Image: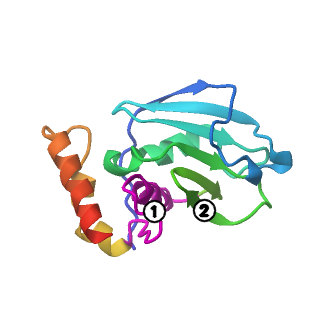
Amino acid sequence: MPDYPLDPTPFTLERVGDTGNCKIEICNDKKTQENWLATYADGPRIRICICPDSFMNVTGMAYRQGQVPLAVRSSVATITAGSKGKGGGAWCVFNDIAYFGDFVPNVFLHESGHALDFAQGNMYGSMGLSGQFMENSMIFSCQTDTSDRYRCLALCYRRVSLLS
């Protein structure tokens, strides 16, 4: 599957005290080192938790998540950078995602696709935005500068629903 290095959506970061639904079980001693709220210019707010000795920092996590198109990113609630040695790969439970590595944008897109599945009520037949779906989808045209963004997003969601 080719990589989709989309320009990231601008974001601001605000430090917060609690972890929300972050996957703290993937942190050493089940404690995070940092908890942040990323607010993206196109609307979504995503809590980002960084475990001690993680592969990525908060700026890298927010940047990569900002490369995920709005139509998919808006379904994500939390992302957590796990501690080294606590696991491998990445996984999503409902709309909360855990990462054990410094991944390319495709992995962030794939895991966010599982959150989109959950948001649409598809909890068991999860597609995670397969390569074939991404190749044939208009989801990448749903950017913030699209004049008819809401129509575009509705079409993207409808297309995802038809494929699931």
Stretch in magenta: 103-130
Mark 2 falls on what kind of element?
strand
Name the image quarter holding the C terminus: bottom left
Name the image quarter holding the N terminus: bottom left
Residue plotted at (40% across, 65% down): 3
Q: Earlier in the sequence, mark 1 or mark 2?
A: 2
Q: Residues within 10 Å of mark 2 (few under 14, many from 20)?
A: some
Disc 1 to disc 2, C-alpha distance = 10 Å
Mark 1 falls on what kind of element?
helix
Residue 7 at x, y percent in the picture: 36, 45
Residue plotted at (61% across, 31% down): 36
Q: With respect to residue 136, does 8 lie above or below?
A: above
Where does label 1 land, which residue?
110
Residue 152 at x, y percent in the picture: 18, 48
State the count of labels.
Answer: 2
User: The disc labelled 1 sits on which kind of residue?
Assistant: His
Location of residue 113 (image quadrant): bottom left
Residue 160 at x, y percent in the picture: 29, 62
Specify how the rendered protein is coloured. rainbow
Q: Which of 96/129 is in front?
A: 96
Residue 94 at x, y percent in the picture: 53, 54
Residue plotted at (69% across, 66% down): 88
| Residue 90 falls within the magenta-colored stretch | no
Q: Which of 5/110 is in front?
A: 110
Where does label 2 land, which residue?
90
Is 13 on the left or on the right of 67, as rendered? right
User: The disc labelled 2 sits on which kind of residue?
Assistant: Ala
